[in-house]
Amino acid sequence: MKALSVAELKARFSKVLADVRRGERIAVLYGRSKMPVAMIVPWAPASAGRREVGFLDGEVTIEFADDFEMTEEFEMTEEEFLGGA
């Protein structure tokens, strides 16, 4: 993995993008202390690694305690919580 300062990144941006297209990851370093602040990585479609919803339907049950309550800061119905809405 390469690491470049902001100035180096600006000066070599087209080459950096070409490297990223080939699968390389580039760390972006910022300030005098050269602290890593970002990573430029190859694009991956949003569907990559997504999980199938409902694959355990009919295989498991979820039960809530009688005193279970949704709090105000978590405004979601039980059905929404379980993925039914």
Image (spheres, rainbow, N blue to C red):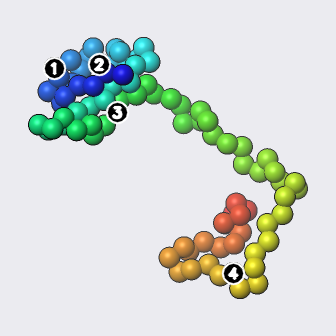
Q: Amino acid at mark 2?
A: Val
Q: Secondary structure at mark 3?
A: strand
How far is disc 1 from disc 3 in space, using C-alphas?
Answer: 17 Å
In this rendering, the answer to whether 70 lies above or below 33 is below
Q: Report if the CB atoms under discs 4 and 3 are less than 8 Å apart.
A: no
- Mark nearer the viewer, 1 or 4: 4
Q: Amino acid at mark 3?
A: Met
How far is disc 1 from disc 4 in space, using C-alphas?
Answer: 57 Å
Please identify the quadrant where the C terminus is shown: bottom right
Q: Tell whether 45 sits left or right of 29.
A: right
Residue lying at 60% horizontally and 71% vertically, measured from the top left: 76
Q: Earlier in the sequence, mark 1 or mark 4?
A: 1
Q: Earlier in the sequence, mark 4 or mark 2?
A: 2
Residue 39 sits in quarter: top left
How far is disc 4 from disc 3 in space, using C-alphas?
Answer: 42 Å
Q: Report if the CB atoms under discs 1 and 4 are less than 8 Å apart.
A: no
Q: What mark, if any, has residue 55 been given in the picture? A: none
Q: Earlier in the sequence, mark 2 or mark 1?
A: 1
Q: What residue would you read off at disc 3?
A: 39
Q: Position of residue 59 (x, y in %)?
A: 87, 54
Q: What residue would you read off at disc 2?
A: 16
- Mark nearer the viewer, 1 or 3: 3
Q: What residue would you read off at disc 1?
A: 11
Residue lying at 22% horizontally and 33% vertically, measured from the top left: 29
| Disc 1 residue crowd, few under 14, some 14–19, many 20+, Cα 10 Å | few
Q: Earlier in the sequence, mark 3 or mark 2?
A: 2
| Disc 3 residue crowd, few under 14, some 14–19, many 20+, Cα 10 Å | some
Q: Earlier in the sequence, mark 4 or mark 3?
A: 3
In this rendering, the answer to whether 23 lies above or below 47 is above
Q: What mark, if any, has residue 68 been given in the picture? A: 4
Residue lying at 34% horizontally and 14% vertically, measured from the top left: 18
Residue lying at 69% horizontally and 72% vertically, measured from the top left: 78
